[in-house]
Image (spheres, coloured by chain):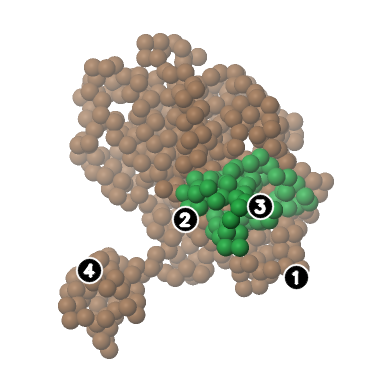
Amino acid sequence: MDKKVSVKVCLGTTCFVMGSANLQELIELVPRKYGDKVDVSGVPCLGLCSIDWEFSKAPYVKVDDDVIKEATVEKVLAAIEKKLSK
Amino acid sequence: MSMNSTPKQTSHLKREILVRLIKAFLSDNFPENTRLIPFAMRPKGSEVPYRCCIHKERAILRDRAVAGLGMSIEETDDSVLLSTLAEESLKRTEPEEDPLTVLTTACKGCVPSRIYVTDLCQGCVARPCVNTCKFGAISIQNGKSVIDPEKCKNCGMCVQVCPYQAITKIIVPCENACPVGAIAKGEDGHAKIDFEKCISCGKCVAACPFGAVHEKSQIIDILKNIKAGKKVIAMVAPAIMGQLPCTPTQLKEAIMELGFADVYEVAQGADVTTKTEAKEFEERLEAGAEFMTTSCCAGYNELVEKHIPEMKPFRSDTKTPLYYTAEIVKKEHPDAVTVFFSPCNAKRKEAMQNPNVDYVLNYEELGAWFVALGIQVAECSESKFKTEASAEARNYAVTGGVAKAVQTMLPEHLPTYPVVINGLDKQSIRDLKKYAKNGVCELGNLIEVMACPGGCLGGNGTVNAYKQALKQLTGYVNESEHLVNEENEKIEK
């Protein structure tokens, strides 16, 4: 275990409206759960929603380089678990 | 504590429909692009995430779009194309009367509300269920408890006494959420709203896991007025300041970018409400009144009108912040079309009764509008409000905030005991009825009533999670000027 897992919750307007407002709890929950093994933060627009009609797949979260579409708290936690178990 | 109880996936669907409707309106062919929405969302060969088949998925999305066009799903014939409805939506001059509509095909899945014995029943010797039932509805058959539905009154006593927790109450979420028994499943299995009883609080909208209760959106009406070049003015409720990821002044700029001519904070009117209500409270107490309730929550006002008329003498006669704000706006701009930016459905009803308020837009709809136009609120420049409101007024959106504001303006010697009703449910309605009947409230004399838990920030039309919204709004309140008791003229204008 050398490198931290990075979690970026997109708080751009589209992601926020389409659901990342409810992902903000991750920003408190993740450090409590995983301590300093995971870096989590809310970030400005990642630009993923502007491609064609991809707003409908928002909210987006990036876990390292993997993009999670239609992200939910459960999906993000599962992705973190997967990274940590490697 | 999750105030925003709308299941996330149903919010996502409703918002996606709104975004697509707005994009369709702004396109060169509104009717045709509206007709295509269900097909664009579920193209041929796509996955069928929720329903039995792609056709039902599309049919339900079509019905959701009907609500988005501001029409009643129940009263719209299935054979009419969305394109035709889109054209019709452009012709109306005012919104439809009842603000809610039920998507009946989506709600058929719920089991009727009843008490049910699960297979955890051990057929025990004590049989507290049989002994507790006042209606003789429970008997033992083949060693298990059985409920006779003819005799059962759904009281739930057996649920409480079963030592195995083997008896459960099956609930219909909308029925369970409604504080006044205005929504129920009819004999055909579909939920139906009784608008004679409905107080427009929006709790059913938030509670239904199928997202089957829709607000009739007025977004098309508003877009139409802006497109026609009218001077459309936004009046934003205090709750909006916690709703989007930007500062209040950026939000104002973002709203201007949608085509609004100006943005007024309804907190400006809240300052008038505070002052007027404080004066009224003082006069009432001096005249011997035992208590007074606030009158700014539209859901509560409709509750009093329809279910607790005996409360009328105890409810403040002071008008709502929206009332005063709209009056100011129409005075300054008699030619303006006014739009109230609301956290909840109940204000739609209040707006319909106020000739100074033309339309209502909730925060889901506002958010969808930003998405449709690709506006990044956090990148907008700062645009100041012409009239600043007080910290107390901006805090109206939080439970306890109204009573606190009124208290600020009361003389110190006046014995003031605030009581906060933080959300209307069956219990708090019973309490209110008791206060009205007895003419006294043993807990205090200044009763603030909010239909939504947490206050307006917990409204059904909000976007942000409650905790975050509260944090953001509190930041704004803390940087605002406080009301000063002596200097009443400061807020008078």
Q: What is the C-alpha distance between the residues marked 3 and 4?
A: 52 Å
What colour has chain A? green
Residue A64 is labelled as 3
Tell me where residue B438 appears, x and y as whole percent. 20, 39
Q: Please state which of the two labelled residues, at mark 2 or mark 1, is closer to the viewer.
A: 1
Q: Which residue is mark 2?
A: B207
Badge 4: few (under 14), some or many (20 or more) residues near its Cα, within 10 Å? some
Seen at 70% across and 50% down, the residue is: A55
Q: Is residue B282 above or below residue B254?
A: above
Q: Is residue B472 left or right of residue B317?
A: right
Q: Are marks 3 and 4 on the same chain?
A: no
Amino acid type, mark 2: Ala
Both marks 2 and 3 on one chain: no
Q: Secondary structure at mark 2?
A: helix
Q: CA distance from mark 2 to mark 3?
A: 35 Å
Lower position in the chain sequence, tag 2 or tag 1: 1
Q: CA distance from mark 1 to mark 3?
A: 32 Å
* Residue topped by disc 4: B161
1 and 4 marks in contact (CB < 8 Å): no
Relative depth, front residue between A27 and B191: A27
Q: Residue at x 72, y 48 (%)?
A: A49
Q: Residues within 10 Å of mark 2 (few under 14, many from 20)?
A: many
Q: Residue B404's spot in the image, x, y percent?
A: 36, 27
Residue A44 occupies quadrant: top right
